[in-house]
Image (cartoon, grey):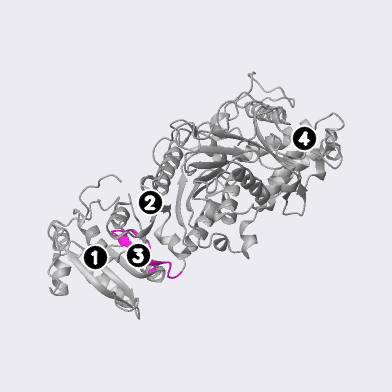
Amino acid sequence: MQGEARTNEAGTNGKTVVFPEAEALVTDGGGRIAPLTIGYETYGALNADKSNAILLCHALTGDQYAAGVHPVTGKPGWWEAMVGPGKPFDTERYFIICSNVVGGCMGTTGPASINPATGKPYGLDFPVVTIRDMVRAQAMLVDHLGVDTLFCVAGGSMGGMQVLQWAASYPERVFSAMPIATAAKHSAQNIGFNEVGRQAVMADPDWRAGRYLEQGVRPEKGLAVARMSAHITYLSEAALQRKFGRKLQDRSAPTFSFDADFQVENYLRYQGLAFVERFDANSYLFVTRACDYFDLAADYNGSLAQAFRDTKTRFCVVAFDSDWLYPTSDSRAIVHALNASGASVSFVEIESDKGHDAFLLHEPMFVATTRGFLESAGKARGLRGRTAPGVCE
Amino acid sequence: MSRMETPRQDHLLIVDMVEEGARVLDVGCGDGALLQLLAERKNVDGRGVELSQRGVNECVAKGLSVVQGDADTDLRDYPDDGFDYVILSQTLQATRHPRDALQNMLRIGRRAIVSLPNFGYWRVRAQLVFRGRMPVTGNLSYSWHDTPNIHLCTIRDFVELVDALGARIERGVALDRAGAPIRVNAPWWVWNLLGEQAVFLLARDGEPPQP
C-alpha cells in the first residue's frame, strides 16, 4: 500500500507517493499544488490495530531521513540520537513516519519541481505555503498509509510548529504530542533573521529572480551566507566559545587579511558549503516564509487556548535553557494556553549549553524525558512492548 | 505501575479529603508520589507543578502530567475554577508570597488542601527556648542557612490567614510526631502545641460544604 521506492526528483531512493490532480493541495494562500508528490521514510512496523504510528516533523532544513544514513550527505539522519532500536523513538515498538515538507527539496513537491503548467521548474511561481499547508500534506500521507490516529506527533523548531498545528487542526487524530524547542508564533527576531537569509539568497547574482535552474546556475554563495548566519542562531554563545574561542585556524598568527583566520570562520564557511550541496535556494525562501507566517493563535481569534479547546491530546512541551532562537518563554506561553484549555500537559526545561540545536543532540535529560513520556502515553494507549514485525512492511 | 513505598501519613489524609474522580492540581508535587497515590486510590485527573527539573523528569517518566514551574509566579496563569482541588503539600512555607499562593489556590480550585509543618510544635519551641538554636526536626530538616523554608508559621497563624482571606476550614487534622492524627475535639492550643504538622481542607466562602 505504500508508494514504490523509485528515484525521486532529488535523485534519492526514498519512498514517494503521488497525489493526482483530483487530490490537489489547496494552500492557505489560495494556491493549488497538483499533482503533489510527497517524499517520505518509515521506520519500524505498523501494529495490527494501527495504534503505534508516530509522525516525526523535521525542522527548517531537515528532511525525511530522520535515522539511518542520509542518501545525499552520507551522514547519519537528523534524529539519529533519538530514533532507532531501543532509543526513545523505538523502531522496534513504534511505526515511525517522517516526510519531507511541501515546499522542500528532498522528494516532496517544491519550487524546484516541474510546474505542470509551464513544463519548467516552479521557481517563485510555487505557491507560498504555510505550516498548516505542510500539515495538510502530511495528513494526506498519513491517510495514504492507512493510519487514522497517530500515537504521537513530535518535532523540534519548525517541526514543533507542525506538531502544534496538528494538535489544533486534527485533535482527534493526535493521541500525544511533543512540541520541542518551538513557539506558537514566530517572533520579530526570528522573522528578522529569516529575512537576512532570504536577502542573502536574492542578492546573489546567480539567483536570477528565482529562475536559476533553467539557466544552469545556482545561487550558492547567497545560500551559504544565509546558512552561516542562521547557524549562529542555532548555537549558544557558551557553546561557540567553548568550541572555538578565538583560536586560529592552521596558523599561529593572524594574516591581516580576510582569510578565515579564526576557527569559527572556517567552521561557518564549512557549514555554508555543506548546506548548498543538499539544499535548494528557493526552498529556503519558501520554508523560512512558512515559519514567519506561523501564528497559531491568530487563527483562533487571538486566543491560543482556544486552539486547544477540549483537546484530549497528551502534551509534553520541551524547551532548552540556552535556546535564544525559541526561548523557554515561548514554550511557557504554549503551556499556559494548554493549562487554560484544561489539556493534559507536561513541561520540562532542559539544562544544556548547546542552544537551539540541543534537541538534535544526545542530551541525556531530553532522552529520559522523551522515553518517559512515550512510555506513559503508550500505557494509556494500551500499547504492549515490542511489535511483531511484518504486520506492515 | 511500580509498587510504591509506604505512603506518607499526610498524603493519606489528603487522599481521604479528595472526592473520587476529581480534577486535581498538585502544586510543588515533587516526585509525584501524591499524584500517583491519588490516581490509584481516587481515580483523579491529576496535574502537577514542580520547580525542580529532577522532580519533573521523575513525574513525566511515571506518566504524570507535570509542568516545570514556580508556585510564586505561575499560578496566576491558571484560569478560575480550572480544578476541583488545588493541593499544596509541605510547600507553603517555601513560597515567597504564601498569601498570594493561597489566594490563587482558592481561585483556581473550588477547594484547596494545604499541609504544612507546624512551627508551634513543642519540640520546635523547646529547641529555640532551651538550646537557643534554630529548630531542626524531621519535618524541618534543614539548617537555618540553607533551608528553602522562608515563611514558617504555626497552625494558629495559618488559621488566622485563612480567616483573613475569607475562606473557611472544612476539615483540619493535626498529626503528632508519629504521624497519627490528634483527637479531633482537642482544642486549638493542643493542636498548636502537639501537632508536628497539619492538613487543612479549605473552601471559599459561599462554596457549599463537601458532602
Q: Residue at x 41, y 57 (%)?
A: B70
**Foreground label between 2 and 1:** 2
The amino acid beneath tag 3 is Ala
Q: Which mark is residue B199?
A: 1
Chain name for mark 2: B
Label 4, label 1: how far apart the Cα atoms are: 66 Å
Q: Which mark is residue B55?
A: none
Classify 10 Å Cα crowding around label 1: few (below 14), some (14-19), many (20 and above): many
Labels 2, 4: one chain? no
The amino acid beneath tag 4 is Gly
Q: Position of residue A258 (x, y in %)?
A: 74, 27
Chain name for mark 4: A
Q: Position of residue A313 (x, y in %)?
A: 49, 54
The amino acid beneath tag 1 is Val
Q: Can you say whether B168 is above or below B130 in the image?
A: below
- Which range is magenta? B80-100
Label 3, label 2: how far apart the Cα atoms are: 15 Å
Chain name for mark 3: B
Compare marks 3 and 2 and give the one earlier in the sequence.
3
Residue designated by label 3: B22
Label 2, label 1: how far apart the Cα atoms are: 23 Å
- Label 4 element class: helix
Residue designated by label 2: B64
Compare marks 3 and 1 and give the one earlier in the sequence.
3
Residue B180 is one of the magenta-drawn residues = no
Q: Residue at x 13, y 65 (%)?
A: B194
